[in-house]
Amino acid sequence: MAGLREMTMGPLDPEMQAILDRRNALGLPGFSAGTPDDARRAFAQSQAALPPARGAQNVTVHDASVPGPHGTVPVRHYRPEQGNGGRILYMHGGGWVFGTLDGFDPVCRQLAHESGAEVVSIDYRLAPEHPFPQPLDDCWAVLEALGEGMPLAVMGDSAGGNLAAALALRARYRGGPPIALQVLLYPVLSADFTRDSYTAFGQGDYLISREDMRWFWDQHVPPEMRHMPEAAPLAASDFAGLPEAIIVVGGCDPLHDEGACYAAALRDAGVKVTLRDHPGMAHGFFTLVDLLSAANAEVRELGALIASRLALP
């Protein structure tokens, strides 16, 4: 891993740095500095400071719900003008503690437009009020309800990437529903905070810190459960038979190395993997549609890759 660190370490992309500077100018506390409600307010404030009406506007959007074991799970459907018959279940980030359908609306709009697939954004329950495995159970209920009958990808960013990877594991254990592709965007995969990327980028200058990640894990998963693969997918003893994976990581992200390690573990088990490593990008870059040129470029390129993988026979 040291060689990988040497390859990807480097200064932040100037556009990425400018976005972080603008966020820092809001004077928001670190996520781990207060209560879950404080973290949710900070997220809402940062979202309110962004320009409205971002993402592709030529998609049809409607809200619905799916019954789940802990109650109704709200979802939002994004249908592109020219669909290809595929579907993406999208799980947003936010450390399992915050995140809303509205907050991730721009990236879901753009993803539907670029991929040609219907995107279904899942408003899963949040910790600490609803700790592990309740968020995963919500996502599983949506997968069971909507996963049949068309080529399907599970996709998520950060904590949502954790849920997407866990869905793929659970579907393998339980024999379906079938998943053609897992797309993991700088995913949370392990509660190991000693990796090189944590040392290099975990001090709080790159959106999230090591202390933030410790705090997120404390809200969601008790220490005695962190050995479970559905909580920490890197803890799995066997990765064979999992769906093809596309893993996106940022070169200036504390979570960089666990994403790269997961790609290596899948590849060693015979799973087809594409690792897309972006030097100069910090955590969260993919969702900054219409704010960061690298975000729009990656959504466009990733959308094309997803379309090719979900192509109907």
Image: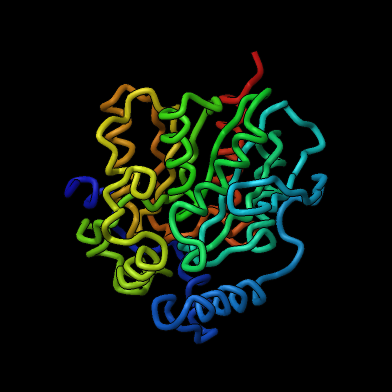
Q: Is residue 203 above or below residue 7?
A: below
Q: Residue at x 67, y 39 (%)?
A: 114
Describe residue 274's horizontal placement relative to residue 118 as left or right. Answer: left
The image position of residue 234, as x and y in percent, is: 30, 43
Please tell me which residue is depicted at 55% across the width and 41% down the height of the picture: 140
Q: Position of residue 249 (x, y in %)?
A: 40, 49
Q: How many marks are shown on the rendered structure?
A: 0
Does any portion of residue 3 appear in the rendered image? Answer: yes
Depth check, front residue: 303 or 13: 303
Residue at left 42%, top 61%? 282
Taking depth in this image into account, of 127 and 24 the one nearest to the observer is 127
Residue furthest bottom in the image: 27
Colour mode of the rendering: rainbow
Q: Is residue 123 above or below residue 178?
A: below
Return the residue found at the far top: 313
Q: For the point 38% across and 23% down, which residue is it?
A: 241
Q: Quadrant of the C terminus?
A: top right
Relative to 115, is 11 on the left or the right?
left
Please indicate, yes or no, whether residue 15 appears anywhere in the rendered image. Answer: no
Q: Position of residue 145 (x, y in %)?
A: 66, 35
Image: 243 above or below 248: above
Q: Which quarter of the picture shows residue 199?
A: bottom left
Residue 74 versus residue 47: which sits nearer the camera?
74
* The furthest residue to the left: 2
Left or right: 95 in relation to 67? left
